[in-house]
Every structure is written in structure tokens, then in C-alpha cells.
């Protein structure tokens, strides 16, 4: 594949500068929010770890109805995108796991057994 050459001029540079500054600002804000866990209540309602909530909020997936079984209870879940979660909300809550990435809600390696390992 060959792409068309870019047009570089004062306007394109100013446009790129604006984007670069906006992205940087957005990332810095995300880092601040991550550090302070700024939206903890909302995060825990969705049962997401800090990384998923503050950094991987807008996941990119194809716009296609997709179904997937929960990795623990086999309940069929439906998504409006190909970016699916590995767990249903109740399994994530019952086991202290992040619904989106399937890791620990506090991103910690635990020694104790998770509830699903005992039952
Ligand atoms: Zn489940
Ligand atoms: Zn996560």
C-alpha cells in the first residue's frame, strides 16, 4: 500500500500542534485522576481497576453486536462492540476482579484464594 504524501504548511503545523497539546493535556489529566483515584465511586460501580478506568476508558472495537460467555459463570453477555469484557458484573464483584481486563480490582497479586477458586 502506498499513501498519499502529506501536505505540510503553516496550517497543517498549527493543526498538529493543537492536537499534540490536547493529547498531552488529556494524558496528564488521566495520570492525575489515576493517582488520586478521582472517580473512585463511579469506578467501583463499574467494577474496573484503575488502569482500565482511567487509561483504557475508550476502547477501540468494531461496531458489531458481539456476545461472549462470562469466564466464570458462563452467562451469555451482549456487547454493542467487538471490545468485550471477560467477566459479567456480578462475577467481577463477587471475586474482586476488574470486569474489563479480568485482573484484580486493585491490580495486586493476591496470595489468598479468590471466591471462585473455593466454590
Ligand atoms: Zn459471570
Ligand atoms: Zn482492569
Image (cartoon, grey):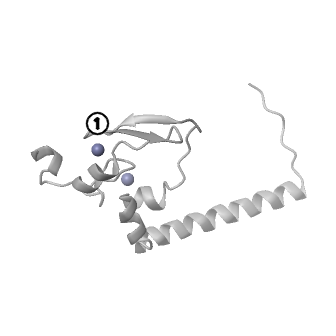
Q: In the picture shown, does residue 71 fall above or below 41?
A: above
* Farthest residue, direction left: 118
- Residue shown at the point (15%, 51%) measured from the top left: 115
Task: Report the quarter where the N terminus lies.
Answer: top right
Q: Position of residue 91 (x, y in %)?
A: 27, 49
Classify 80 as above or below 29: above
For the residue carrying disc 1, how many other residues have a C-alpha within 10 Å: few (<14), some (14-19), or many (20+)? few
Q: Is residue 29 left or right of residue 13?
A: left
Image position of 68 (left or right of 55): left
Q: Residue at the location (28% across, 36% down)?
A: 74
Compared with 69, 106 (above or below) is: below
In which image quadrant can residue 67 be found? Answer: top left
Q: Quadrant of residue 93?
A: bottom left
How far across and how far down the image is residue 99, in percent?
Answer: 36, 51
Instruction: Indicate the position of residue 27 as horizontal and vertical percent values.
Output: 56, 63
What count of labels does the image hold? 1
Q: Secondary structure at mark 1?
A: loop
Quadrant occupied by the C terminus: top left
Residue at image coords 35%, 64%: 44
State the image coordinates of residue 45 (x, y, percent, origin top left): 37, 64
The answer to whether any part of residue 114 appears in the image is: no
Is 80 placed left or right of 49 in the picture? right
In this view of the protein, can residue 41 be seen by the observer? yes
Asked whether mark 1 lies closer than 8 Å to ligand 1, one says yes
Q: Which residue is mark 1?
A: 74
Q: Outermost residue toward the top?
A: 1
Amino acid at each position: 500500500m502506498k499513501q498519499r504524501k502529506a501536505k505540510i504548511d503553516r496550517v497543517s503545523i498549527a493543526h498538529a500542534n493543537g492536537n499534540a497539546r490536547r493529547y498531552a493535556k488529556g494524558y496528564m489529566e488521566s495520570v492525575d485522576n489515576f493517582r488520586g483515584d478521582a472517580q473512585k465511586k463511579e469506578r467501583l460501580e463499574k467494577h474496573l481497576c484503575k488502569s482500565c478506568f482511567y487509561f483504557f476508558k475508550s476502547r477501540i472495537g468494531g461496531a458489531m453486536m458481539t456476545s461472549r460467555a462470562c469466564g466464570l459463570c458462563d452467562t451469555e453477555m451482549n456487547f454493542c462492540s467487538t471490545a468485550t469484557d471477560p467477566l459479567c458484573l456480578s462475577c467481577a464483584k463477587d471475586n474482586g476482579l476488574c470486569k474489563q481486563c479480568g485482573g484484580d480490582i486493585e491490580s495486586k497479586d493476591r496470595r489468598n484464594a479468590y471466591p471462585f477458586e473455593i466454590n
